[in-house]
Amino acid sequence: MINKLKKISLFFNIEDSILEEISSFCSLKKYHKDEIIFYENEKSNYFYGIYQGQVLMYDVDLKGNIIPKNQFGCGDIFGLIAQIQNRPYCLNAKSESESEIILIDYSKFKKYISNPPFSDRIIKMLSNQIVQEIEFNKLQKFDSTKRVIHALLNFPHRFIKKKKYLLAKELNMSAETLSRILSKLKNEGIVCYCEKAIKVLDHEKLRKKL
């Protein structure tokens, strides 16, 4: 378990003796594609570290449609905010692929969070998440094309291994509209589809479209 914890960003370069203590209250669980990890309003003692795979955090509207909120990959942690605030999870979480996820018992881990480097890392991580969400939500003031362009320039990680219909929902547009905009940018040689990701080839040309 120690070697697996070392792959999680929160535990990078932590002494083995401390990781050995933490590993005593961790467990590794495998999840299948689309398997639910937890539901909104569910309460548990765990937060999670992704050893392998991808996880989607999402909300559900009144019609039962999925509203993507965040996506996490290898090395990321999620579910920690709910534990720190001692409240149920505010979103649903599901595995987007075959995944291996470390479950960490927060009731036993919390004694570490007030001490560096954990305290510094957690503050930085949570601050970055909040700023990213605030900035991403500002995209709604743009038209569809500029929304996609701003997202490509400022939030490239959103375009990595994510299905178009989920991207479209995040950007508040139809999947058809997103496909049309990306196809046009691809035909102009500005973006490409590489290894299940949409990558910008010509940043300068893309900026000129704003």
Image (cartoon, rainbow, N blue to C red):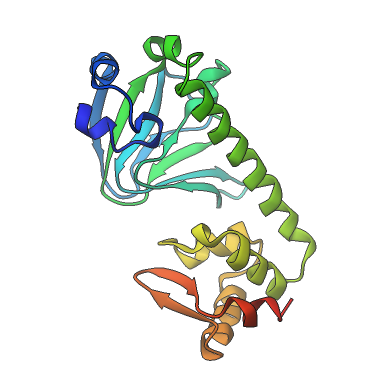
Residue lying at 41% horizontally and 11% vertically, measured from the top left: 107
The x and y percentages for residue 102 are 29, 31
Residue 167's place in the image compared with 88, above or below, is: below
The x and y percentages for residue 196 are 37, 69
* Residue 123 is at least partly visible in this image: yes
The x and y percentages for residue 43 are 47, 20
- Which one is nearer the viewer's eye here, 87 or 208? 208
Residue 6's place in the image compared with 109, above or below, is: below
- Which one is nearer the viewer's eye here, 128 or 117? 117
The x and y percentages for residue 198 are 47, 71
Residue 56's place in the image compared with 21, above or below, is: below
Residue 181's place in the image compared with 20, above or below, is: below
Question: On the rendered structure, is 23 left or right of 140?
Answer: left
- Which one is nearer the viewer's eye here, 109 or 177? 109
Q: In the picture, which quadrant includes the C terminus?
A: bottom right
The answer to which quarter of the image holds residue 146 is bottom right
- Which one is nearer the viewer's eye here, 119 or 101? 119
Residue lying at 71% horizontally and 81% vertically, measured from the top left: 208
Q: In the picture, which quadrant includes the N terminus?
A: top left
The answer to which quarter of the image holds residue 206 is bottom right
**Which residue is farthest bottom?**
187
Residue lying at 67% horizontally and 66% vertically, measured from the top left: 150
Residue lying at 46% horizontally and 23% vertically, measured from the top left: 118
